Image (cartoon, rainbow, N blue to C red):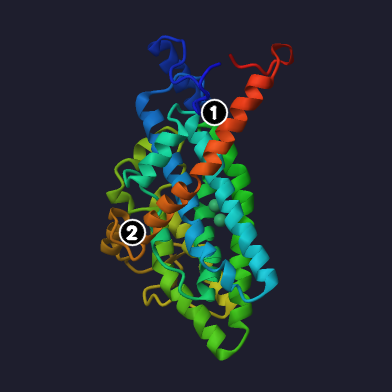
Amino acid sequence: MTTPTTTRFPTTAPVADDEGQRHFDRVIAEDSRIEPTDWMPDGYRRTLTRQISQHAHSEIIGMQPEANWITRAPSLKRKAILMAKVQDEAGHGLYLYSAAETLGTNRDELVDQLLTGRAKYSSIFNYPARTWADIGAIGWLVDGAAICNQVPLCRCSYGPYARAMIRVCKEESFHQRQGWEILYSLSHGTAAQKQMAQEAINRFYGPALQMFGPPDEDSPNSQQSMSWNIKRFSNDELRQRFVDMIVPQAEALGLHFEDPDLKWNEERGHYDFGELDWTEFKAAIRGSGPCNVQRLQRRRQAFDDGAWVREAAAAYAEKTASRSTPERGLHVA
Ligand SMILES: [Fe+2]
Ligand SMILES: [Fe+2]
């Protein structure tokens, strides 16, 4: 019997490079999709492996700040909703690891990159959720920013990533609505509840805007990603789109953003907003954000605690495979 492996797709397609390149160029020019068995440039494969796996790591690490509130949710209904949301994020991580694996790097390696600190994940998850209102702010602003980033990825040139994004985006829309609804309840509650909601969005406004990445002039790889149809809009375009969306939503909540430069610009037809603290952003990416150490420690612990599940699943898969008959087309040896 063959040893089970998590890599299910060939890393090189059986075509000459120049023929493959012509096919690749044609697919990109037609705005069509590249599939796992197609030839692709090494840089394209590397870029997507990095992007999709970082996205998967972000979904998995992003479960932590919210999971910390499951036991403290203010009602049974809120607890059930939050549990479902955190479970959705685990599912997003799993779709994305599967999509990344189609590029030829197996999941064990991708997970190892996260656990050993070689891979990055979204800086936003290095911030703590201090109050219940933060759970509302995370849903509304963090999942909201994720939607702005991810809706264009549904048209990404790499088929498995684009298809994974369709379902992810549908679920993120629910997440955003539940966050907004938590904040709406608080902002229409007591004065103390309204203040808690305001303080939560004060904390998350800047970090949520930074989720779109550095300004365009500091994002040298964006142009290549755009020419490969991986990325459809620049970081600054997406950030602007997000700000234009959340300002009226904040007004509907009866809350505001503490940004003195935030105002409607009639000429541009967009909201202007203040400079973000990029030194803080870089620190959170490099590992010195408020919760970086805690997040990675927790993930390593969860990985170790889950060893028996992986062993049991592998033993079960082996047993099932050895019992299968060739006639049923299930025998793998
Ligand atoms: Fe998600
Ligand atoms: Fe989400």
- Which amino acid is tagged 1? Arg
Q: Which of the two residues, 39 or 7, is positioned nearer the viewer here?
A: 7
Residue 307: x percent and y percent? 49, 43
328 sits to left or right of 318: right
Residue 42: x percent and y percent? 36, 25
Residue 202: x percent and y percent? 43, 75
Residue 60: x percent and y percent? 49, 51
Q: Which of the two residues, 45 or 209, is positioned nearer the viewer here?
A: 45
Q: Which of the two residues, 313 or 134, is positioned nearer the viewer here?
A: 313
> Disc 1 on helix, strand or loop?
loop
Of all residues shown, which one is farthest toward the bottom?
A: 191
Quadrant position of residue 204:
bottom left
The residue at which mark 2 appears reads as: 293
- Which amino acid is tagged 2? Val
The residue at which mark 1 appears reads as: 33
The quarter of the picture where the C terminus appears is top right
- The answer to whether residue 97 is above or below residue 10 is below
Residue at position x 42%, y 68% in the image: 128
Distance from disc 2 to disc 1, alpha carbons, whole Å, reads: 39 Å
Badge 1: residue crowd in 10 Å (few <14, some 14–19, many ≥20) = some
Residue at position x 52%, y 35% in the image: 99
The quarter of the picture where the N terminus appears is top right
